[in-house]
Amino acid sequence: LVAPGRYREKLIITRALALAGDNALATVEGVEIHAKGVRLDRVDTTGGVRVAPGAAVECRRCVFAHEAGVALTVAGACLLDDSVVEHAKIGVVANEGASLHARGSTIQLCGLGINSKAPIILE
């Protein structure tokens, strides 16, 4: 559980875990995911999220932003569920071989919404 507050460090996840923000806003600088079985719930970022090749993450009720770059870069597998990607030069980049499924999510206020070299599912 991440306590409410603003964390200026980048979080690097190298093993399966579930990370949930409290009901109050918990913001981390950025997240890099290098493992399968990762779940993010109510986690907000200001420096974007990167999903490495071979990694898999489920993001629920999250807000991803990166005013100077890409809010969400997917090279592995990512499920966005009821999440928001916003305030970025590029909202989402899905690299070749990636798997991205966005369900009930919003991409807004980005210079470019989606740049994809892989099939994506938007519901």
Image (cartoon, grey):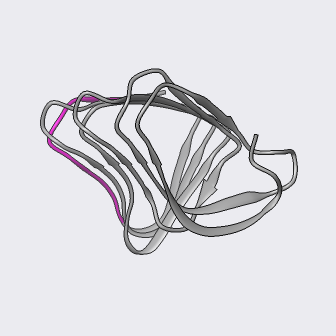
Nearer to me, 105 or 58: 58
Residue 39 image-quadrant placement: top right
Instruction: Name, please, the residue furthest toward the bottom.
Output: 68
Instruction: Name, please, the residue furthest toward the right.
Output: 23
Query: Where's residue 44, x and y in %?
Result: 64, 55
Location of the N terminus (image quadrant)? top right
Instruction: Name, please, the residue furthest toward the front.
Output: 15
Query: Where's residue 93, x and y in %?
Result: 28, 51
Task: Check if residue 113 falls in the magenta segment.
Answer: yes
Residue 14 image-quadrant placement: top left
Q: Quick check: can you spot residue 101?
A: no
Give the tally of numbered discs: 0
Query: Where's residue 119, x and y in %?
Result: 22, 29
- Residue displayed at 47% across by 67% down: 47
Assign the magenta stretch its main secondary structure.
strand
Task: Check if residue 111 falls in the magenta segment.
Answer: no
Q: Quick check: can you spot residue 46?
A: yes
- Residue displayed at 18% across by 34% down: 118
Q: Which residues are magenta?
A: 112-121
**Above-or-below relation of 4 to 14:** below
Query: Where's residue 115, x and y in %?
Result: 24, 53
Nearer to me, 58 or 34: 34
**Above-or-below relation of 67 to 109:** below
- Residue displayed at 68% across by 61% down: 27
Left or right position of 66 against 76: right
Left or right position of 47 against 99: right
